Image (cartoon, rainbow, N blue to C red):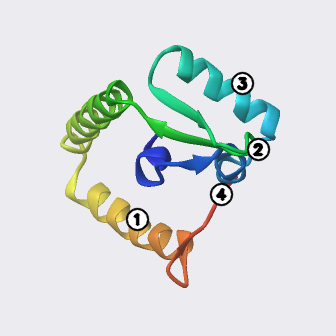
């Protein structure tokens, strides 16, 4: 859902490519989220392109999920030793370099 937040109006095929899923699998997933009213699916005038975006409910749900995840991560990290936190910090720097190449995000699917 965060990808949709950052790319409003993305096509179904564009989202499928990012997720590394087939078009039918992505379509089925999106249909469930449309039914739950978190994603809005719009069909273009030529009917060949479908654009996707988050609804207000979707944006709110994403914000709540991010906040709860941040809180849980903070609680868990606060229980670690200084040495463990240093190790995690070093690993995060390495991961950051591995996932960004030439300024482009790498799809890990």
Picture coordinates of residue 47, whole percent (x, y): 73, 39
Picture coordinates of residue 43, whole percent (x, y): 64, 36
**Distance from Cα at disc 1 to Cα at disc 4:** 16 Å
Residue occupying the point 21% across, 35% down? 71
Q: Which residue is mark 2?
A: 48
**Distance from Cα at disc 3 to Cα at disc 1:** 34 Å
Residue 64 vertical position relative to residue 48 in the rendered view, above or below: above
**Distance from Cα at disc 2 to Cα at disc 3:** 17 Å
Q: Which residue is mark 1?
A: 92
Q: Which of the two labelled residues, at mark 3 and mark 1, occupies the earlier sequence position?
A: 3
Q: Residues within 10 Å of mark 2 (few under 14, many from 20)?
A: few
Residue occupying the point 50% across, 30% down? 40
Q: Secondary structure at mark 1?
A: helix
Comparing 1 with 76, the one in front is 1
Q: Which of the two labelled residues, at mark 2 and mark 1, occupies the earlier sequence position?
A: 2
**Distance from Cα at disc 2 to Cα at disc 1:** 41 Å
Residue 108, disc: 4
Q: Nearer the viewer, mark 3 or mark 1?
A: 3
Q: Nearer the viewer, mark 2 or mark 3?
A: 2
Q: Secondary structure at mark 2?
A: loop
Q: Which of the two labelled residues, at mark 2 and mark 4, occupies the earlier sequence position?
A: 2
State left or right for residue 96 relative to residue 43.
left
Q: Which residue is mark 3?
A: 28
State left or right for residue 67 relative to residue 88.
left
Q: Residues within 10 Å of mark 4 (few under 14, many from 20)?
A: few
Q: Quadrant of residue 32?
A: top right
| The residue positioned farthest toward the bottom in the image shown | 102
């Amino acid at each position: 859902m965060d990808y949709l937040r950052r790319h409003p109006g993305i096509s179904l095929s564009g989202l499928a490519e990012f997720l590394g899923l087939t078009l039918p699998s992505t379509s089925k997933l999106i249909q469930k989220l449309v039914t739950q009213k978190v994603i809005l699916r719009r069909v273009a005038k030529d009917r060949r392109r479908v654009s996707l975006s988050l609804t207000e409910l979707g944006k709110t749900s994403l914000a709540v999920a991010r906040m709860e995840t941040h809180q849980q991560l903070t609680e868990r990290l606060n229980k670690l030793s200084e040495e463990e936190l240093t190790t995690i910090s070093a690993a995060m720097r390495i991961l950051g370099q591995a996932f960004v190449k030439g300024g482009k995000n790498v799809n890990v699917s």
